[in-house]
Amino acid sequence: NQPKTWSQRFESALDPIVAEFNASIGFDIELIEYDLTGSVAHAKMLAKVGIISPEEAETLVSGLEQIRQEYRQGTFNPGVDAEDVHFAVERRLTELVGDAGKKLHTARSRNDQVGTDTRLYLRDKIQTIRQNVRQFQRALLRLAEQNVETPIPGYTHLQRAQPLSLAHHLLAYFEMFQRDWERLGEVYERVNISPLGSGALAGTTFPIDRHYTAELLGFKQPYRNSLDGVSDRDFAIEFVNAASLIMVHLSRLSEEVILWASQEFNFIQLKDNCSTGSSIMPQKKNPDVPELVRGKTGRVFGHLQGLLVLMKALPLAYNKDLQEDKEALFDTVKTVQGCLQSMTVLFDSGLEFRTERLQTAVAEDFSNATDVADYLAAKGVPFREAYNLVGKVVRTSLAAGKLLKDLTLEEWQDLHPQFEADIYQAIAPKQVISARNSYGGTGFEQVRQALNTAQTLLEN
Ligand code: ARG
């Protein structure tokens, strides 16, 4: 157990329970590579403005890179006595390079340092998660391309409404994830600002160059206000918000997959690579992936709420409360990535739509009733009048145990003289779907155009 960096100020040691409670090294080690990168930039800047010599900077940089190697090789494992990743690195650096190591923290505080690390970390993770979103969109698109003319019942209120092209249904999700991808890009812009050089809160007496460190680290610009730089976490909340919306979208799709896999719907068959069995019921095949995604959605929402409450009414500037932002962020990143990757496997190779069952499903209900009303309305009958008439037909057909396609032409014409033999064609599921050819509709022509648009979107 080594003494704390700040121990000279104190007469006696930290209580071991408090030391453990206070330490963040158990989780902020996740930031180490970003911490090293930030320190390299800081060291170069210190030399550039003449606060340290170029030789000292070189020594610092090579020491920092050596720590990176040690970490990657698994030989750098600081314990609780290091307190946090920043102290752990500084201590090891001084062990490695001697006195030069003690100069690294000139004109810097852990407050601007941790803010820098967190932003570098998030920048990286946002890019990876955007790739994960893209992969999932590709899986959705592939499946959509194969299923333009595969029908699926469309629902409102979870009641059969109008039949759809399965591709149209899948492309609805593609669009949601397109917005998620864009949203992450927008969040990135606000993550990509450098707090480095804000000092503890007020800036520094040294002639530092914040624009230079910002540039070295690839940040768009430095924070304009040092207090804001060290105490802002809205960028983290925005990220978890974007992540939460991804989870909203994933959870809606998951719920549909779970329903579709049930015997009641029987629209999909789960493949062995994505489902699990039961310890007692030999017949079971369970949709664990979408169920877990649905469940994990709750924890990401929890992190969003947690961060909002963490920041509420927190006075300027740094408060130790802020140390609590990290586990929420790390867990959000890990959870969203895991969900996106597993759902990609599920949609790439873990399920199969039962095409025949879908064909019969859309033929066995009254989801073509709107089309009968549209048929008459197209012939000049006011829509509401046609609608009322078809409502009556549905009621009497139900009572007679018939579907609309079972009515004879005589029966149709008794209902309204404008019905002709082409009514059968007009209410056939395929026609019902392909006729909805308005912009953004489920008509096959529209869907084919939407597939092209989706392809183009993926190229960006
Ligand atoms: N481990 C700390 C955190 O994550 C680093 C910043 C500590 N700053 C301080 N003034 N105690 O927030």
Image: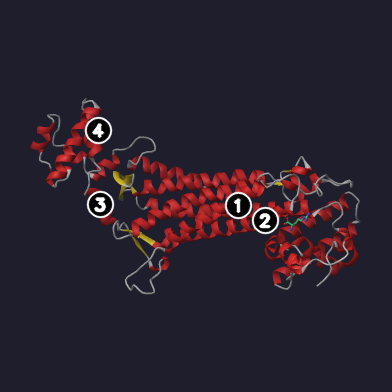
Q: Secondary structure at mark 1?
A: helix
Give the camera-side residue of 446 and 83. Answer: 83
User: Whole-percent x and y of residue 389?
Assistant: 18, 32
Identify the residue at horizontal 55%, vertical 51% (top origin): 243
- In the rendered image, which residue does mark 4 sit on? 374
Identify the residue at horizontal 50%, vertical 55% (top origin): 297
Give the camera-side residue of 457 and 238. Answer: 238
Q: As shown in the figure, which amino acid type bears the numbered disc 4?
A: Asp
| Residue 257 placement, left or right of 295 | left
Marks 2 and 1 close (CB-CB < 8 Å): yes
Q: As shown in the figure, which amino acid type bears the numbered disc 3?
A: Ala
Q: Secondary structure at mark 3?
A: helix
Q: Secondary structure at mark 4?
A: helix
- In the rendered image, which residue does mark 2 sit on? 324
Q: Nearer the viewer, mark 2 or mark 4?
A: 2
Residue 239, above or below 266: above
